[in-house]
């Protein structure tokens, strides 16, 4: 009977080392183009989704994705197209100069998008039937509108929704500084240094 000798630790690590070495060489060769490739893929995805949403392009995966977007986001599915295109543009732009992400503003814009879905659903009379066929704010907008309606009542919930939407937009687009400087100019004074 022959005794099996255990493989050395070097032999066990060789496949992982080979993969890591291949990935390292791939990154060295294509690394500077990685963000450009990602940007082009995101922009192409934005065009495909846009064509699919307007039923100008068809395909098994594209039809499924667009039906899912319409059902859950309604007319807000166009925000997906916008964010894909914006992400592609930012990825390409970041190859020249590194980007600093103002995460507070990004989160405020995301909140504004969700509140937009709820506002669309409220404009569509908060109808689930309309939301399920891809209209207004979709299922997400319908559920947010219903939440505001049940928690605060139809009138006060709508007012809070609009005020929250305006606040999120102003924070996302950094309009507070512009408003402050405009108010200082209206008062005839220069802004106070912080």
Image: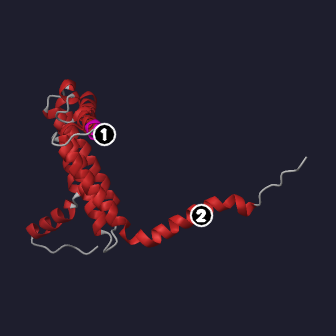
For residue 130, above or below residue 89: above
Q: Which residue is mark 2?
A: 18
First of labels 2, 1 by sequence position: 2
Q: Residue at x 44, y 72 (%)?
A: 29
Secondary structure category for the residue under label 1: helix
Residue 101 visible: no
Near-viewer residue (146 or 176): 146
For residue 36, above or below residue 75: below
Q: Residue at x 17, y 37 (%)?
A: 120
Magenta includes 97? no
Secondary structure category for the residue under label 2: helix
Q: Which residue is mark 1?
A: 61
Q: Report the span colored magenta.
A: 60-65
Total marks placed: 2
Q: Residue 57, image x and y in percent? A: 19, 43
Near-viewer residue (62 or 2): 2
Q: CA distance from mark 2 to mark 1?
A: 34 Å
Dot 2 crowding, Cα within 10 Å, few <14, some 14–19, many 20+? few
Q: Residue 157, image x and y in percent? A: 21, 34
Near-viewer residue (179 or 94): 94
The single residue placed furthest to the top in the displayed view is 129
For residue 110, above or below residue 9: above
Q: Residue at x 33, y 57 (%)?
A: 104
């Amino acid at each position: 009977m022959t005794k099996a000798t255990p493989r050395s630790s070097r032999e066990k690590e060789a496949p992982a080392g080979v993969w890591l070495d291949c990935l390292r060489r791939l990154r060295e060769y294509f690394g500077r183009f990685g963000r450009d490739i990602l940007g082009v893929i995101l922009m192409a995805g934005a065009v495909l989704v846009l064509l699919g949403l307007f039923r100008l392009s068809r395909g098994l995966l594209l039809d499924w994705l667009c039906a899912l977007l319409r059902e859950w986001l309604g007319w807000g599915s166009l925000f997906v197209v916008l964010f894909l295109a914006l992400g592609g543009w930012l990825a390409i732009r970041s190859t020249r100069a590194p980007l600093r992400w103002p995460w507070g503003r990004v989160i405020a814009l995301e909140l504004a998008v969700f509140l937009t879905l709820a506002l669309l659903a409220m404009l569509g009379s908060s109808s689930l039937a309309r939301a399920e066929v891809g209209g207004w704010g979709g299922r997400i907008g319908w559920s947010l509108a219903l939440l505001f309606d049940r928690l605060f009542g139809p009138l006060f919930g709508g007012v809070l929704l609009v005020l929250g939407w305006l606040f999120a937009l102003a924070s996302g687009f950094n309009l507070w500084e512009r408003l402050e400087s405009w108010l200082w100019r209206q008062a005839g004074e220069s802004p106070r240094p912080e």
